[in-house]
Amino acid sequence: MKKLLLIGTIGLILQGCSGMKSIPMTQKTKDAAQQTRTYNLVLQDEVRPAVNLSNSTSGAAAGGLVGALITTAIDSSINEDRAIGAFGVAAPLLNNTLDLDFRKLIVEEFNPVLISEFNAKDTKERAETKYLDEDKIKAQISTLKDGEAALYLYTHYQFFDNFKVVLFETNATLYVAKEGKVSVSKPDYRNSFTYISDTVGNGGMDSIRLWNDENAALYRTTVNTALSKIKEMLQHDIKVAQQESCLTGTKYTRYNALGEFNSVGKITAREGKRIQIRDNNGSLINLADNLLVKELPKECKA
Amino acid sequence: MKKLSTLILPLALISTSALAVVDVEMKVSKLPKKVSKEQQEISAQLASSNCAYVVNPVMDIRQNKDAISWKVNATGVQQWFNAVHQDVITPLIPTASKDIVVEVTPKLNMLYTYNEQLNINGMAVSTVDYSINGKPAGQYHVRGFNSDTNWANGDNEYVDSAEHAAQHLITRILKKLPEICGKAG
């Protein structure tokens, strides 16, 4: 069963489960990171469609290994049909945006911040494509000298809620060499930044049509806005993470690889109908206010 | 939902911590019977249509040739398409000469795989330029998709899923030919 769970969920972290605890930036860390090496990773070649996955594997545990294996086979087959269906729905948009170079757009947006805030000297023209395992990161950070840091960024993006919303998430992890010491298990700063688009259309083909109209103008604009907002959240986070407070918790809806779920956080900014929330786990999320489950607390209203 | 996340996240973390991107050669494997049968049916359609066909080998113009997933890269992709062109596609194309000649030149834009729950999904994306009697006549997009159960998370499972997606792509490129011929007539 453990093996099945492992296999079934091996990509969850990469797909953005935001399970990592955030570590706030401190002035001490900022001062110590005088020059930063960067690794800006985007694994996807294009946006991932929304799929309503069959999710009965957890329940299969009660049926023992055989039950789990049978459920796995059934789930896998159901998921295959759903994935094919999802790509069928998304194909017009995906084909129409083959020219959209997400890896180039993200570095164009992020590089100025990496240079100005982290004093990065090694920024690239396109995001990286290769996942680095812990051993490789360990080997890289072991060569850091005092005053040097390494920043690892990983971004993924996917449609949710039957193509009504598209979500972008960037995870940032910083290691700084201090007095010759740096450990892969103890980053000096870590957080995730999420942009959830406005809700578009009634789902399925209707939403894809709206995203895709006029050479996918809405989708292209959303990609640019998302990257810009994530960049702003990163900038904001490394400046104010420790001072920020908005006392009352607010429930809101968000998404991850397992689907839709409610989370709790504090509203830190508002611009029109869009709000920025610092989740209780420390991560920053930019979303439309229709995803709020609970009324805004007075002290958090704009 | 939260309960499930709590249970599986630490396991997923453990599993990802010991893995790196490795190169695996994409070798031509035997076509599944279902695919082979479908391609034979397309071949019969091509023979009975009003056009002659020239299908050029798929050109690998991918921007990302470094990784087909977070775990694996497939090497020898162009060689795979060349071999399939010679051994699978060419025998399917009728040789009789006809007044209308449809020529297609497919380019491979993307080849990738990804994990989705208990599956490894594969996607191959192609842009196909076509001409009629030597004159450029248009372009279309074709996608090959595959979804296999992820049994052991083996490197070869990712490359196999990519290969199956590429096989599906080839079938769909061929399937489109009679439609182009219909427009040309």
Image: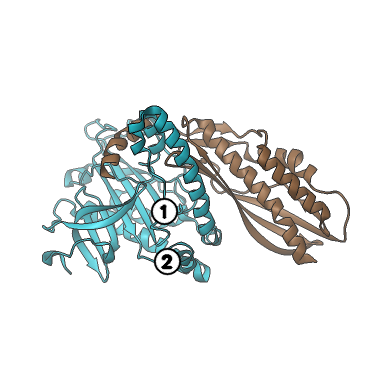
Q: Name the residue under label 1.
A: A158
Indicate the quadrant where residue B146 lies. top right
* Secondary structure state at the residue bearing disc 1: strand
Instruction: For the residues labelled 1 and 2, say whether their Cβ atoms are less than 8 Å apart.
Output: no
Q: What residue type is labelled 1?
A: Gln
Identify which residue, B22 or A61, lies in the foreground: A61
| Left or right, residue A82 beside residue A169 | right
Q: Do labels 1 and 2 share a chain?
A: yes
Q: Which mark is residue A221?
A: 2
Name the image quarter holding the C terminus of chain B: bottom right
Q: Judge left or right: residue B171 versus residue A86.
A: right
Q: Is A244 placed above or below B157 here?
A: below
**One can see residue A143 in this view:** no
Name the spot of residue B92 as percent of width and height, x first.
78, 45
- Where residue A13 sits: x, y (%)? 35, 41
Q: In this view, does B98 lie above or below B66?
A: below
Q: Nearer the viewer, mark 1 or mark 2?
A: 1
**Pointer 1: residues within 10 angstroms few (<14), some, or many (20+)?**
many
Residue A233 falls in which quadrant of the image?
bottom left
